[in-house]
Structures are given as structure tokens and as C-alpha cells.
Image: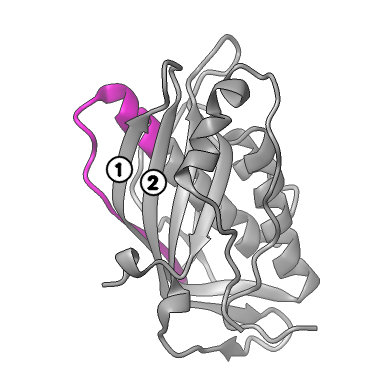
Amino acid sequence: MARRALSVSVTTLTATAALLLTGCGGGDDSSPDDIKGADSGGSSPSASASVSTAAGQPDLSLPSDLKVQFDVTPPADDQHTAALDNAKNYILALNHGISAQDADDPAYEFYSLGNATKYAKEQIQAYLDGDWTATGIDSYYKAKTDDVGSSDGVLVTMCRDQSKFYGKNVKTNKIKYTKPSLDDYQEFRLLMKPPQASQKIWKVLQIEVQGRVKACQR
């Protein structure tokens, strides 16, 4: 079964950005994705991607059979670079929670707020409920960053390729391989909130995922 993705428009995300960034509201439209390669119903940890991290960060190491790759160019703007780095850390943390089989993993909580925290928890819980973990290569590329209106927020957009990313049953260690298709290509949009007061780092406030994106095929 291919992973299901939430379908939204960029305007939907940016239209609520001002309210979200000031803590005045905002909806939650996310729902758990299907586990890629999964039907319905013991590796050593290793770092899988090089990104900038904050002091006191949680463990983001992954099993040796799971790699997260980022083929992205840092923006010229330092604030955009910091936002992009922690968008990547959030994705790493999500994969860490899946591999650790922990829906309350502090890693994703460290890099997220609100909708994005709920999204990560639901994604990890969906894996746990089906006795699945992840294996293979989870690839991200074509990253871009944009200012969000008059706020200090940054919208990070990245393509995702799951053609070599599979579900693995934790009880049998059987991997559910899938044939490459348009279902493998998604676009991630992550609304980043800048450091404020006790929040020392950029955090993901909201995440939206568009599935079957032809522009992300490669």
C-alpha cells in the first residue's frame, strides 16, 4: 500500500501563518499516513545525515539500515539557513521516533510545536499500531525557503522521494518492497517559527504534505 499524503495548497498554509505565528489559532488538518509498503490491518545506531543542531539536542541517531538524505543547498540568508536546518532535524526526529518505536519520543517534541508535534506523534503511532518500522533511504531535495508575509516566520518546502524507503515488520523483520511510482513523490511544507523567549531554536509549527507530486519526480 502506498503512503497516503495530505493534499493542501500553499495558500492554505500561508493564509493562516500570521495567526499561527502569533499563537492566535489555526486548524489541524493532518492525519496519519499509511505505512509505505505495508498491508492494512536489531541494528546498531548511526548518524544518517549532517545538519546543524542546538546545544542540548536529543539523540537523532538512526539504525544502520535507515538513512535520511538531504540534497539541499543552504540559503544565503542566515535565518533561512537556521530554519531549514531545524526543518531537517524535525524530519530526522520523526524517523528516530519510528525506529525507536516511541510515539512520545522527545526528539520530535524538541523541534516542533502545535500541529507539527501532533503530526509526528500520529505518524509514529501509526507505525507502532501496525508493528512496523522503517528501513531504506528517505530522500529530500529541491529545498527552498520563503518569508511568511510580514511575520518573522519562514516556510520551508522540500521534495521527498520514498522509492527506496520501505516498511519492515518488527516481529518478522520482513520488508515490504514496493515498485517505484508517482506515489513515492511528495512535497513537504513546514512552517517554521523563529526563536522567542524560552524557545531558543527554530521550530516546526505546522506541516502539510502534498502527495503524488509530478514536479518532485527525478
Nearer to the camera, 82 or 158: 158
Label 2 neighbour load within 10 Å: few <14, some 14-19, many 20+: many
Q: The C terminus appears in which quarter of the rendering?
A: bottom left
Up-down relation of residue 108 to residue 55 (above or below): below
Query: Contact, CB < 8 Å: mark 2 with mark 1?
Result: yes
Nearer to the camera, 101 or 121: 121
Q: Which residue is mark 1?
A: 144
Q: Position of residue 128 (x, y in %)?
A: 75, 67
The residue that appears at 46% across and 44% down in the rendered structure is 10
Q: Position of residue 85 (x, y in %)?
A: 38, 38
Using the image, tell me which numbered label, if any, was put on residue 157. 2
The residue that appears at 23% across and 34% down in the rendered structure is 75
Kind of residue at disc 1 = Lys
Magenta-highlighted residues: 66-85
Q: How is the image coloured?
A: one colour
Q: Position of residue 183 (x, y in %)?
A: 48, 76
Whether residue 117 appears in magenta in the rendering, the answer is: no
Spatial CA distance of label 2 from label 1 is 5 Å
Left or right of 49 in this view: 171: right
Kind of residue at disc 2 = Thr
Up-down relation of residue 51 to residue 79 (above or below): below
The residue that appears at 61% across and 64% down in the rendered structure is 99
Q: Is residue 60 visible?
A: no
Q: Secondary structure at mark 1?
A: strand
Label 1 neighbour load within 10 Å: few <14, some 14-19, many 20+: some
Q: Along the polypeptide, which appears first: circle 2 or circle 1? A: 1
